[in-house]
Each structure stands twice: as structure tokens, then as C-alpha cells.
Image (tube, rainbow, N blue to C red):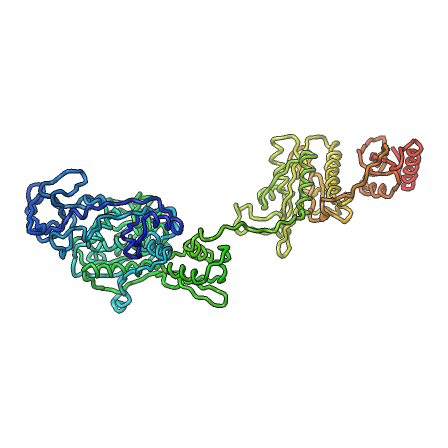
Amino acid sequence: MLISLNWLGDHVDLTGLAPEGIAERLTVSCAEVEGLTEVKIASDFAVVARILAARPIDGGLELELNAGGGQRVTLRHAAAPGLAEGRHVAYGPPGFPWPNGGECREGGLVSMAALGLGEDVGPILCPADASPGTPLSRFIPTGDTLIEIDNKSATHRPDLWGVYGFARELAAILRRPLTPLDTADLPRFGDLPDLPVANEAAGDCEVLTGFAVDVADLPVTPLPVQARLALMGIRSAGILVDATNYVMLETGQPTHAYDRDVVSGLAVRMAGKARDFVTLDGRGRRLEPEDLVVFAGDTPVGLAGIMGGARSAVGDGSTRILIEAAQFRAARVRRTAGRLGLRTEASQRFEKSLAPGMASLAQARIFRLLEAWGAAPAARSRLCVQGDAGLTPRRITMRTDEISRNAGTAIPDAEIDRILGALGFGIERGDGQLAVTVPPHRSRQDIGLPIDIVEEVLRIFGYANIAPRLPTARIAPVDPNAGQMRQRKIRRLLSTGHGFAEVQTYLWTDDTWLREIGYEPEGALRLRNPVAPDKGRLRTTLVPNLLDVARSNAGHRTDCAIYEIGRVVLPSTTPHREVDRLCGVSLRAGRDDTLESHYREIKGILEKIVAATGRGRLRTLPIEPPDATLPWQVPDLTATLADDTGPIGTIGVLYGPIRDKVATGRQVVWFEVDLERLTQPGYPAAAFRPFSEYPGSTQDFSVLWNPERGFAALETVLEGFTHRLVRKREFLMTYRSKDLGPDGQSYTFRYFLADRERTLDGEDLEQFRHAMLGYLATHGITLR
């Protein structure tokens, strides 16, 4: 985007400032300046000439000119619009520096391209009140500086897509007054009739305005305006069109003028069907049903926000116009412009989400320019507005100290009020609150939160004016989180110590898998927006998800052991409570006669987990009866896990149909532990017991026990035996044989013995063994 420094000077005094300094201030406080281009304009070499005669000849016209000072010039020129007797044109006398370095003995008509302004090679038409011989430099300056703005840095600021927006910023930055934009008082036409204006696409058109105007005269566009348009790459197309283009470049709000002899009313709606449409550039376009279109009746007359139609274009003789200004939805304009490959000055601005309040401002500015340029406009309707005109004040309330608090330094209230006022904001203070009224030229996407107001003040105040200061923070040791420490120890024990692989499953369950295993979770919390229709319930247990992972792995490996530490959402709790659980599944190939050792191995791992978390001894208790709603709790193959404080989880073996769903013919042992029951910290967990300085010994006992009485009952009996030499008891193995009888089974335990004061001898071991056998005899237990 290019900004003319001369044009900026119309709105804010830039006296005494170098272009480089202005560019730097804009970059630091407003938008990034990519570069400066000095433009030399050859206006001091050209003069105004009056056409005394225009005679057609082969290949063009023979023109007789009055170049002032009694100088009459005859020259030939190609036919062009406006070259007629009595018209005033720009003339380059002999010695004019033509761009190609050539010379013309009798001089020639000068174009904007010849002056160094743009690429238009057509002759420049001058106002009728310009006397022949007047230097063109009286109307067009001999030089200008173009400021090139990085578009990306102004994407969020649609108000900066016009010269006046940058003038407002510079006025605030430089502490210089901003010249108010001269606009017409359109409310005075409130008694005039309405225009038939309809907004039938409110979702894609926030506001639509229409205004009917007649002009009594069509004078030539003022030369400074023509020059500025040319410098921005826009060719002069008559005073009516030039007014709309000038206001777009000045305020950032695109508008469009329709010939009211063709278009008497407007309606904005979707194209509705595929249709052909010829735009102002004379090219045919294929409209799609979802394109936003401006209609006159049932006839499309404009591509909303992009380009008008050729049929309704304002011509050289048009004196009755309908001016449209609107705010079209950015995404809709961008989509249509991209599909058609038609990016225009208007579409670029609409794609930035213009503020709706700019539409009425642009209408008032166009009417005032037509008055100032001598077109003698007359309103033929009131300003008709459909939708949100954006004139209702938006307020943002914040604490009075919020700006200074975010800045990290004290900014005086007077400076805050000055900055906000210069940017167009209204300010009210009271009761420790700052109420800021957002001006209509700022979009909702740009200004909507208190922090946006903070940013406005700080960028103008200058970040360089805020003394850098390192943040201060109190550093204190953080106590370890007991739950996390406990989980880390469990992970280390399972993954490193026993080769388990940790998995992570989703917080929801797969209804298809639940139906397959016959599980219906009662009271499970349902998601409002599930990722898939069959994944809408939050898990109440980790077991189904872990069994599903085991099933997936069963096809790739013979054995696998997996676990997960994750959260479940407990049903029937208000509010729904999340708890941490540990769940594991061990899958092995093997005969059923090895299943018990597989089970006891997993139980032994859980014993280590309980011991590592400082919970004492782990016991297994029978479930009477198992929960019939949980298909993995197979009767006689499921037990409750308990420690010294009570139940902490369950352990079980899959068998029958449920096992075949997971891994046919495999051994499947599962467990689930409520980690919230393991509330004691893992560090420090068990108290340290010093090692004996003297050698110890071990004694193994294989006792006979009826398995129907349960292993837990046997352990309870053994827990009752105490002796000063016992340091630890450990279960080793179980053994079955027909020689032991139908109700007999051998269980082997190992006792670790030591004395802290001396080395054990044979007599010590014999005394211990005698005491142990006596204790067993009192409970009817014999050795194998």
C-alpha cells in the first residue's frame, strides 16, 4: 500500500519533518514502512492550454491551442475523449522532458505518465477556470514522497487502509492537530423520500447504505485530485467516479456509483444460481450461487465488494447517480475474489473487515467533495441505511490503573487522555474506572477488550519510553507433589523393573468395543460434541480400553504387558468427579497349568507397588459375588486387592468368551488400582531398617493347605507368627499333585533370618524351625 506524503500534509502539519523520520515513527508506533520513494513531477515544465479548434484528420485530430501569452500552437494528436473546442488541456511546450528522451518541435499534450505520475497516457483535461499559460505546477506539486506500507502489518487495522487513518496516527504520535474531515450534513435530507434499498443477506452484509444524488454540472476533476489518483495507479474517469475513488483512498471505505437512469434501487443477496455477468472492465464473469451480488430488481449490477457491472456504469453524461456504501463480510468477498482471480482496491479493503460506521461517513464525504468541486449536487433521497450503521457507541470499561499496570511504569492520566482523544476515543473517568468509547472508524475485530486499549496507549506513548526492568520473582523451593512422585515410582517399577509398556488411551470409550464385550457403563457422562458418534461416553474404568489395546497387540506378538495411569470420570457423582487409576493387562501364551504362576507373578508386582508407596502388605480377598455388569470380572477368577487400610482395587483372569474377544487361547491377567487410595507419599515411603552386620540365613517351608480356604486365609495365619530373627517372608511357589490328595496343595514360603549382634549358628536355626513347626501345628498345618 502506498501513501502520499503530500496528501498526508492536507490533514496534519508535517512541517520540519524529514520523510525518513516520519517513516521511522510510523514503523515504531503504527505499521511497518517498507520503503520511501521520491517522485519527481514535471509539472513545472507544462502549462494549461485552451483548445481553439479540433479538426478531424486521418489518424486523429489537428488541434489549435492557445498556450497563453499570445502563443498559438497547432499540433496533431490521436483522438481521445474530451478533446473538443473550448476544453482546457495540459500542454508541454518545446523543451518539455518527455519520458523517452525525445523532443517535439511544436510541443505536445501532456499525460499523467509524461509528468511521472502513473501509467495513464491519455491527455490531461484541466478545469475551465484555469487560464491558458498557467503553469501546471500551480495545481500539481513538482514532487512527492511515497511511503510504502507493509500490508501484513495493517491487516488488523482497516482504518489504516486510507490516508486519513495514517494522518490520525501521525497527529497522535507528533502531538499535532488533525484537520477534521470535511463532510456534508446528510441528516438535513431526512425529509426526502426513501430509496428502495434492501439487505437480504444480513449475515454477509452488516450494513448497506444508498443515497440518490443529481448533479447540475460535470466539471473536470480538479488537477490535484487527478494527480493523486494517478500516483496511486487509478486513472481519472470523470468527476463522479473520481469522487468515489478519492474517498476510498482517503478513508479506506470503498463505494460505488450507479447510473440512476439504469438502477433505481438496490438489493444485496446471493446470486442464487450460476449466471453470467459483465464487470466494469468489460470481461464476462461466471457467478456461482454462493456469490454475494448487488441486484437492481432481478438484474445483477455489481459483484459485492469487488467490482460493479458494465451495464450500470456511470458514463460521461450521467447526472443522476445512486451511491452505494456497505460493509460486506470479509470471508465472502475473499472467497469470490480468489475464485474469479479479481482482486481490486475495493476487495482488498473489504477483506480487512471494515467498520460499519465508515459507510455513512463515506457517503457524506462524497457529497461534500462534489459540492467543493463545482458539480452542484442535489440530494434526491435521504440516506437510506439497512443494517447496523455502526453509530451506536461501544464502550469498554477498565480500571484506571490498568494501563500503567500493564506498562510496568506510571503513565500520567493526562497523557493517556491525550493519546486516546487524538485517536478518536472518548474518555470518562470516575470511581476508579475508565470508560472508553470506541470511535466508529475502529472495527470490532480490532478493538474489543481492555487490553486493546492498553495497546493503543502504549504504542503511541512509545515502548522506548518504558525503562527496561527485569521482572522480580520470589524463588522458593517447591514441595514435591506426592501424587506425581508416586506415579513416577510406579512407572519406573513397571516399565524398567518388569518390562511393561505404558500406553495412553482416550478419555472416552468406544461403544462398538463395549457392545462386543457386553459392557454397558451406567451413568457415564456423555459428550455434547463427540469426535465420532460411537465415542460419546467418558470412561468410568480403564479396563475396557486396556483390553482393546491388548487385543490390537495380540495379533503382532505372543506376549505383551501394558499399563496405563489415567483418569476416569466416576458415574453418579455431582459434580462428576475425576480420579486417577492404574490399570494393567498381561497377555501370554501358555497352558492353563501355568496360569496360576502368571497370576501370582502379576500379584507379586502389585505387592512391590504397594510396598514402594508405603502402604504395607497387599492381600487378595474374594469378591462375593463379582459385579455381573463388568464382564471381565469372571466368577472364581476375580479378587479384591486390599492393603492395611482396606480395598484398593481388583485383579482377575479372563476366561471363556471374554478372553476369546481379547486373545483366543492366551492367558490374560488384568488389574485396576485406585491411586487415590494410595494417599501416603512415596518419598519417603518405607522406613529404613539398617542391614545386619552379620551373615543371615534363609529357611523354606512347604505347607499343605486346602485351596478352597483361599490363599489370603493362609497368609493371615502366617502373619500371626512372630520371632526375633525374622526379617522378611516371601512367597515362592505353589505345587499340586495327586499324591497330595484332592483337597491338598503345597505352598512354599521363604523366611529371611538375621541377628543384629552376631552370626547365626545351627542352634539358632534349629530353635527357629522348632518354633515355626509348633505354631503351624497349633493351626492344623503340616509340611509337605
- Left or right, 645 with respect to 82, comes to right
The residue that appears at 36% across and 63% down in the rendered structure is 391
- Residue placed most toward the observer, 43 or 208: 43
Q: Nearer the viewer, residue 495 or 109?
A: 109
Q: Is residue 610 left or right of residue 250?
A: right
Percent of width and height locating residue 474:
61, 51
Note whether residue 159 is visible. Answer: yes
Q: Position of residue 124 (x, y in %)?
A: 16, 49
Could you tell me residue 569's position as x and y percent? 62, 50
**The C terminus: image quadrant:** top right
Number of numbered discs present?
Answer: 0
Residue 323: % across, % down: 25, 58
Which residue is most to the bottom?
Answer: 191
The residue shown at (65%, 37%) is: 562
Residue toward you, 413 or 555: 413
Q: Image point 24% across, 50% down: which residue?
A: 229
Residue at the far front: name it. 16
395 left or right, relative to 565: left
Q: Quadrant of residue 101?
A: top left
* 143 sits to left or right of 623: left
